[in-house]
């Protein structure tokens, strides 16, 4: 039995992107530390911590007007996925042992899969902006890593 499907995750991301506005970006950014804390505290989400940091950096650059080369749908999906992590009573309430963060992980993983090209373009932008076109983005500057590992999936939750 599948507890939470990729189809349902896609529905959540599509609905969130359809109702996206600047306030949602600001809300995600203002809850950055709470979201990062929740990601690190969850065994299902912790493997994605570096990718989440990159998502936040991209949202920050978008909000500041430093980086606008990303489709609005992608910004909406990223904001939705990050804010979904904060919802305690989502599709699978987070207080349910073991299963509680599965839906959060599926939504986040699907978002990463769908925006991987946007993330690659953003990393290239960062390398050029930071003057290190031939080098990976320095993770010590913002907690970002150079690669999003969309092939590694913690557990079997998104099947």
Image: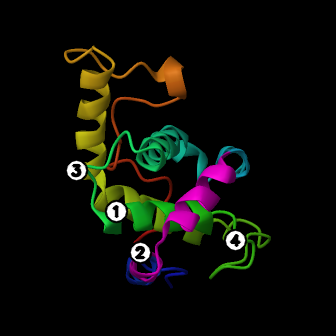
Q: Quadrant of residue 92?
A: bottom right
Residue at image x 72%, y 77%? 93
Circle 3 sits on which residue? 117
Residue at image x 44%, y 69%? 158
Circle 2 sits on which residue? 17
Sequence-wise first label, 4 or 3: 4
Question: Circle 3 — which element?
Answer: helix
Circle nearer the viewer, 2 or 3: 2
Q: Neighbour class for label 1 at 10 Å: few (<14), some, many (≥20)?
A: many
> In x, y percent, where is residue 117?
22, 50
Residue reaching furthest right? 95
Verify CB contact (< 8 Å) between mark 2 and mark 1.
yes
Looking at the image, is 50 positioned above or below residue 138?
below
> In x, y percent, where is residue 124?
23, 32
Q: Disc 4 and disc 2: Cα gap in Å?
A: 17 Å
Quadrant that contains the C terminus = bottom left
């Amino acid at each position: 039995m599948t507890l939470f499907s990729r189809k349902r995750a896609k529905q959540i991301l599509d609905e969130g992107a359809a109702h996206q506005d600047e306030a949602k970006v600001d809300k995600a950014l203002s809850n950055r530390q709470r979201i990062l804390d929740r990601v690190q505290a969850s065994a299902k989400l912790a493997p994605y911590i570096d990718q989440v940091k990159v998502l936040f950096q991209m949202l920050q650059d978008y909000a500041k007007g430093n980086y606008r080369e990303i489709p609005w749908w992608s910004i909406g999906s990223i904001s939705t996925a990050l804010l979904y992590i904060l919802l305690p009573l989502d599709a699978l309430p987070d207080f349910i042992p073991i299963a509680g963060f599965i839906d959060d992980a599926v939504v986040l993983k699907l978002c990463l899969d769908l925006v991987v090209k946007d993330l690659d373009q953003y990393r290239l932008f960062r390398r050029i902006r930071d003057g290190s076109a031939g080098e990976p983005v320095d993770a010590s500057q913002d907690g970002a890593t150079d690669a999003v590992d969309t092939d590694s999936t913690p557990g079997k939750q998104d099947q």
